[in-house]
Image: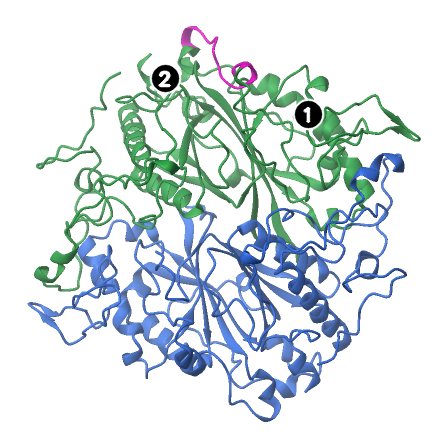
Chain colours: A blue, B green
Amino acid sequence: MDKPKDVANDDKPKSRGISRRGLFGVAGAGGIGLAVGALGVNAVNAATDPKPAGTIVDFYGDHQAGIVTEAQDRMHIAAFDVTASTRESLVSLLKDWTEAIAALTQGREIGEGATDGNYDAPPDDTGEALDLGASHLTVTVGFGRTLFEKDGKDRYGLAGKLPEALIDLPHFVGDALEEGRSGGDLIVQACADDPQVAVHAVRNLARIAFGRASVRWSQIGFGRTSSTSTTQATPRNLFGFKDGTANLKQENADLVNQHVWVSDASGPEAWMNGGTYMVARRIRMHIEIWDRTSMREQEGLIGRTKKEGAPLSGGGEFTEPDFGMQGREGPLIAVDSHVSIAHPNHNNGVQMLRRGFNYTDGSDGLGKLDAGLFFIAFVVDARTHYVPMQSAMARNDVLSLEYLRHTGSGLFAVPPGVKPGGYLGQTLFES
Amino acid sequence: MDKPKDVANDDKPKSRGISRRGLFGVAGAGGIGLAVGALGVNAVNAATDPKPAGTIVDFYGDHQAGIVTEAQDRMHIAAFDVTASTRESLVSLLKDWTEAIAALTQGREIGEGATDGNYDAPPDDTGEALDLGASHLTVTVGFGRTLFEKDGKDRYGLAGKLPEALIDLPHFVGDALEEGRSGGDLIVQACADDPQVAVHAVRNLARIAFGRASVRWSQIGFGRTSSTSTTQATPRNLFGFKDGTANLKQENADLVNQHVWVSDASGPEAWMNGGTYMVARRIRMHIEIWDRTSMREQEGLIGRTKKEGAPLSGGGEFTEPDFGMQGREGPLIAVDSHVSIAHPNHNNGVQMLRRGFNYTDGSDGLGKLDAGLFFIAFVVDARTHYVPMQSAMARNDVLSLEYLRHTGSGLFAVPPGVKPGGYLGQTLFES
């Protein structure tokens, strides 16, 4: 792969291409007089010191990080509208993002850092994550359908490469989608142990995008609701139940290869090999109503016990549910329970790799918290791996019908990983 | 102090007064048939096991916790409108909250817990913080002016005890306050190492308040912007600068006693002795504009270096600023810099104990992140310790004028701490 070509054309050597002068130009001069001599104490540039390796997730690889990576506890995700007027400008954005993400995920600062001793220009890095380390940061980037075609227009010469799987998700029963929480040309999912590290990443990528893309929506998630590794304990969602017990785990490479990674795309879609599709759904939970529901009904709706997360047919958390086991009044696990409707056996064997987060966004103005689940799943094809299951849930799952409302939605094609010298989306633009 | 009297009148022994039956009644019966026999595996009640003591902050004391307590990294704060129709109902709410907070801050569950084996009623605890421990949780409760008097009405027989210091904050230059983010009869500040623990606390207190108080606004803060102990490193705000270097620290008991705790109230206000006042301000930061400002201007506006947080007059982070030191173009620290305008020397010697948090709430709909500082300060009297400084800042501080916009506001009387057997606000209601 080629080295990114749009490194800043600057007059002094530097280790990375993004430069305050190249990207941001010279900012307005400050109105406050300061003697330059007094500032020398701060001129040492520590931006190149990587932080302890123990918290670094490798950015480079066949697949993007932040998918099968052990799910971090905090997330900030943002969708962008691309405003770039040319394909070249869009590619330059992706190259700049690649370089920035490679630095941030190693605990380095953007460009020459937040405190490089040049006082005449804005710092390359905004600085609020100084001292916080890499914090297992991953940044995962995807492309929305509107990047390929919008209002019938082939904006960036990509229409011919629009994957068939990058559909407009259909309307599901009960959807209450808000335009301002849905869609987007680009998606950036930043996950980390420390939320400030994730927010810092999104904020700096938004800054780098200035003039080429702007924030469409963003969401902060305070607690993960899925595990993606057998080494992780199963977390709880805002219904108080363990979530994602049956989630795909990174250790099961065969299933991940089957259900997550695109591997047999060909022709104009070949660029997606090694990639996947991200389904993002903001799901408001009616927690106040849930909280007035009896334990029997709660467990019945989920199909698992609250404490252990064991299927109601018996055993422990990781025991396979026995949908045939009968109680006095019918199956122990109701056919319209969440675990039953979502189970692979009832969905043509498909599985998802979920990576969602609990959120709370203030109040709803009606005396209640606005809280719920920001659902994220990575699947090989949403047409087989999301739409049928969500259709069934929206129609039949009592949990979905009475306690959930989908308020935001997006589907994004997540291109394969990046090799050193390459950039995010290179297979799309150069194939 | 008396033992709370409104313990649930239930037919079986229990260790705590809040009961699913007492508080929530019997919920609607589930529509899903389940054989009771299959559920026995989950009937063990582990709700009474306290979590490891290392992460517990004592709830009881002369002062409420969550003020001088070492600032935790995450926060969820919510204001409530009281809907209780009687004073007795309001008192019962405060007693129930006291009992719940005492349990939660020890890492215990509310009442009989989330999984107590009673399937006919909703669980007492919503369960999403099971296994997360106490996580240094503190919950701090305060009273808004409207609790004492609203629209000229003495709602709960408290008007005679309205402290003079519990003013309506004046309008400051540049304020853009939103009704839905301001005010409130009650405030609940939950801080913890794990945000899910803080959210769980607020959510369960909101649940307990059902029928007596409803959520007016809430805010999640992802990263602390102040230290309250000399043992803590100074964190950074979203301008990328260290914030709160000169903050009051718990180790300086004399200054804390002088500037934070009410100690000389008398007559109808005597109930506030041992208490303090919380100023809460949601401050949107125009981070995109800031990010295009040169390093010289950034440091000039703050009056400190970005990297070390040292005053521009020289030295290290904790060196006292020398406002008289001249550079070639005037004082090294500009008179209208943030550090100068906020310094005690320029504010009649007053100091604040700040305890704010960075926030980001999606986007502003205009292509930018909605992000900033949720400012919280505890002061002995906002009339002397907040209003003059904020007036000066709003008028003269270039930082405030160009980069900040206050969108939410509240002032709350925070009553003294609770002794075992007592309840929050007891001195107010029983004096």
Q: Return the x and y of residue B275 as percentages of the image width and height.
A: 44, 19
Q: Return the x and y of residue A352 as percentages of the image width and height.
A: 40, 74
Mark 1 residue type: Ser
Name of the residue lying farthest toward the right: B328
Q: Is residue A173 left or right of residue A212?
A: left
Given the image, what chain letter belongs to the residue carrying mark 1?
B
Q: Which mark is residue B428?
A: 2
Can you tell which quarter of the image residue B302 is in? top right
Given the image, what chain letter belongs to the residue carrying mark 2?
B
The residue singled out by tag 1 in the image is: B391
Q: Quadrant of the N terminus of chain A?
A: bottom right
Q: In this view of the protein, which residue sits in the foreground, A180 or B194?
A: B194
Magenta residues, start to end: B254-268
Q: Return the x and y of residue B169 as percentages of the image width and height.
A: 58, 25
Q: Quadrant of the C terminus of chain A?
A: bottom right
Can you tell which quarter of the image residue B356 is in? top right
Mark 1 Cα shell of 10 Å, populated few (<14), some (14-19), many (≥20) = some
Name of the residue lying farthest toward the bottom: A267
